[in-house]
Image (spheres, rainbow, N blue to C red):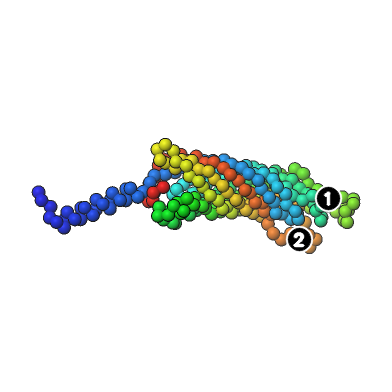
């Protein structure tokens, strides 16, 4: 049977389209887990923040290779102030644990990185936001101003143990490493997070605003590096990875 010319042209174009589409997409794993750690800096009611540490574990569901939803648990220590140098003689050390739900959106979801080596190399840049709770355990705090201060004996109100709303805002970079089969399997992660806590539990001080400045949420910024491993079932993506 001999096909007429219009039908032959149509089948040729269809074949080229299907072939091009199949080569223009890649496969990725639906899940990843990881861990990491680093340092943090506090910005609370205490005038001078201190440096502490943060460790975390994370489990993500990959909606696409560049859009993730996940859960993250953190453990760390936040501190600030100095009984001698702080203008109100305040000082605290808090051990904390937190649990948040997070969403992250990477640059690779929007740009045509296959046309630019520069864009390809930075496709893992992302922004993210989360929501959860932070459990504060103040292990060391100055509750009463010392006798040599300008207001000796004043007792700072506040709680040593509390749970507050926790909102992390993340900016970071994922560096993807392929396995022997060409899949994006491993990730080196660098992240900076501003962690907003709503309440007065992070530093343990809850002074009335008419006596001390106390208008902003307690914040600690965390700077971490971590490792992630991708696993699970495989899905197709519309662009080459």
Query: CB under 8 Å between callouts 1 and 2?
Result: no
Against 200, residue 181 (above or below) is above
Q: Which element carries disc 1, helix, strand or loop?
A: loop
Instruction: Rate crowding at label 1 as few (under 14), some (14 to 19) or many (20 or more) other CA atoms within 10 Å.
Output: few
Residue at image coords 48%, 40%: 186
Residue 3 shown left or right of residue 125 in the figure: left
Residue 22 visible within the image: yes
User: How far separated are the C-alphas under marks 1 and 2?
Assistant: 19 Å
* Front residue of this view, candidates 81 and 62: 81
Find disc 2 in the rendering and name its residue: 213
Against 56, residue 216 (above or below) is below
Residue at image coords 77%, 51%: 81
Q: Residue furthest front?
A: 117
Count up the numbered dots. 2
Q: Which element carries disc 2, helix, strand or loop?
A: loop
Q: Position of residue 7 (x, y in %)?
A: 16, 55
Which one is earlier in the sequence, the residue at label 1 or at label 2?
1
- Residue 22 — which label? none
Residue at image coords 12%, 55%: 4
Find disc 1 in the rendering and name its residue: 84
User: In this rendering, which labeled residue sits more in front, label 1 or label 2?
Assistant: 1
Q: Residue furthest left?
A: 1
Q: Position of residue 13 (x, y in %)?
A: 23, 54
Residue at image coords 56%, 53%: 171
Q: Position of residue 233 (x, y in %)?
A: 41, 40
Q: Position of residue 149 (x, y in %)?
A: 88, 53
């Amino acid at each position: 049977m001999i096909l007429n010319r219009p039908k032959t042209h149509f089948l040729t174009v269809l074949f080229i389209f299907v072939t091009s589409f199949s080569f223009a997409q890649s496969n990725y794993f639906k899940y990843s887990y990881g861990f990491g750690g680093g340092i943090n800096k506090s910005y609370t009611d205490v005038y001078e923040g201190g440096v502490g540490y943060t460790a975390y574990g994370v489990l993500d569901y990959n909606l696409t290779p560049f859009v993730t939803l996940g859960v993250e648990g953190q453990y760390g220590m936040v501190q600030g102030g100095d009984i001698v140098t702080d203008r109100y003689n305040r000082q605290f050390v808090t051990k904390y644990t937190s649990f948040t739900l997070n969403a992250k959106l990477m640059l690779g979801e929007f740009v045509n990185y296959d046309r630019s080596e520069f864009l390809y190399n930075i496709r893992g840049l992302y922004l993210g936001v989360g929501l959860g709770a932070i459990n504060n355990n103040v292990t060391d705090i100055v509750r009463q101003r010392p006798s040599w201060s300008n207001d000796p004996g004043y007792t700072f109100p506040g709680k040593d143990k509390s749970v507050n709303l926790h909102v992390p805002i993340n900016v970071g970079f994922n560096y993807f490493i392929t396995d022997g089969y060409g899949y994006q399997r491993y990730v080196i992660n660098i992240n900076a997070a501003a962690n907003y806590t709503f309440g007065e539990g992070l530093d343990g001080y809850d002074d009335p605003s008419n006596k001390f400045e106390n208008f902003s949420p307690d914040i600690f910024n965390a700077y971490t590096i971590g490792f992630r491993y991708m696993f699970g079932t495989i899905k197709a993506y519309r662009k080459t990875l």
